[in-house]
Amino acid sequence: MKNISVQKFKGKLGIAVSGGIDSMTMLYCYIKAGQKDFIVINIEHGIRGETSLRDTDFVRKFCEENNCEFQTFSVNVNESKGQGESIETCARRLRYEVFDRLIKTHVVDAIALAHHADDNAETILMHLFRGSGLRGLIGITSSENYIRPLLKYSRDEITKFAVKNNIEHIEDETNSDTSYTRNYVRYTLMPLIKERYPAFLNSLTKISTSAKEADEYLVKEAIQPTRTNHGYVIYNVFGQPEVLQKYSIMLAIKKMGHQQDFETRHIESILSLAKKPSNTSIDIPFGLVVTKHWKDLIFTKQGTEFFKECPFDLNMVYTFKGVSYSFVEANNIEMGSSLDFDKIPEDAVIRERLPGDTFKRVNGRTKSLSNFLTDLKLSKPIKDELLVLASGKKIYAILGVDTADDAKITDDTNKIIHIVKKRVGGKNE
């Protein structure tokens, strides 16, 4: 029987313990290794009612008896589950939100998780079934903040070690429920595969290593997303080989705070924008919007903020989507931001742009506002944050962009006002 061991961690370690055989074995090994600076972290998901609370109590009691620092956190999967999100995915997301918060607030330096070789194999299979690309073959890996000391051991090896060392644990009754995808893979598919191919776990480990090497190279070659006021943009992505397009897209999705559970079909739907007109947008999972802007791709969150129309007031500051607009009296003319105050109608309002709006720039010709903005080649996210000074359908100013011929400065102008645009917390633009 193979001995199970872990290396002591230099720093404050959070050890994630559910009470199951894997995490209790990991905790046992850290105690035996002499790990002193650690906290046992338990997440109660609110799924299994009293039995879930029982598991937490089991871990708490063990920690009290063994003088281990203990913290438990309760999350509610049923209330937090997003549209189209599985219970498994939601539970994982909520767990990592807790873990990430503990790391960012320096409660711990890293989290130890009890994933093992079988978990890794199951993960790779599930990625393949969902249509994952090369990255899905990597499976589970350790990182700077998340260490997985049992990853080289199989479930069978951990079980035998736990039995030999009388490691107490609790069985989660939902582990045998094959309506959960992972349990179906674990208890139905994996035994059949191992029976036919005994070296299956070792083979997947080799594939995982090769995939990781290729993935690291492609990440370096891909276009790195650039941070914007709206999210992220990938410049000239459609001028690259398709494999680098895909990797650039995955990097942008990761920058937006997501990566888990994005499938090849989602990447393909984004790539389909290459044949669409500029400023075409598509919605992808987790509330993300991708917009094609010529050869670029812009990644933003689905907007829920709306600007309530209000009367124009020289003394007001108007704020929308992280941008503020104010009006100041001036003695000079600034192209695109100067107005003749007396030419602005009394019924003028500040609002978002609407269908049917018209605009005539200084010494220009009247166009629909939509066509004017298209001529400027503004991206959709930029257009969506615009406010206008309007009377009816006539636009007197596109705030922060241009002013209209109907409000231009002439020799008869008595009062010049400037439009001042400022990013909230930033400088004037």
Image (cartoon, rainbow, N blue to C red):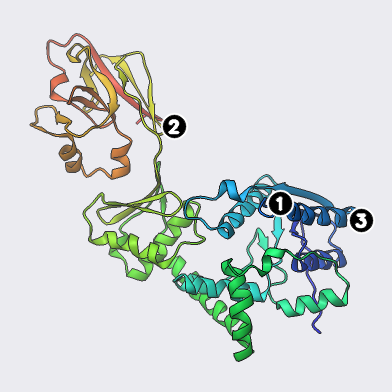
Q: Earlier in the sequence, mark 1 or mark 3?
A: 1
Disc 1 secondary structure class = loop
Q: Amino acid at mark 3?
A: Glu
Does 28 sit left or right of 104 as displayed? right
Which residue is pictured at 62% across the width and 74% down the height?
Answer: 186
Q: Quadrant of residue 267?
A: bottom left
* Residue 50 horizontal/vertical position (percent): 75, 52
Q: Which residue is mark 1?
A: 49
Specify which label sits upstream in the sequence, 3 or 2. Answer: 3
Q: Position of residue 341 (x, y in %)?
A: 22, 13
Tag 3 residue: 65
Q: Secondary structure at mark 2?
A: loop
Q: CA distance from mark 3 to mark 2?
A: 54 Å
Question: Few, some or many C-alpha atoms within 10 Å of disc 2 (few <14, some 14-19, many ≥20)?
Answer: few
Q: Distance between the Cα atoms at labels 1 and 2?
A: 48 Å
Compute the Cα span from label 1 to label 3. Answer: 25 Å
Q: Is residue 20 left or right of residue 320?
A: right
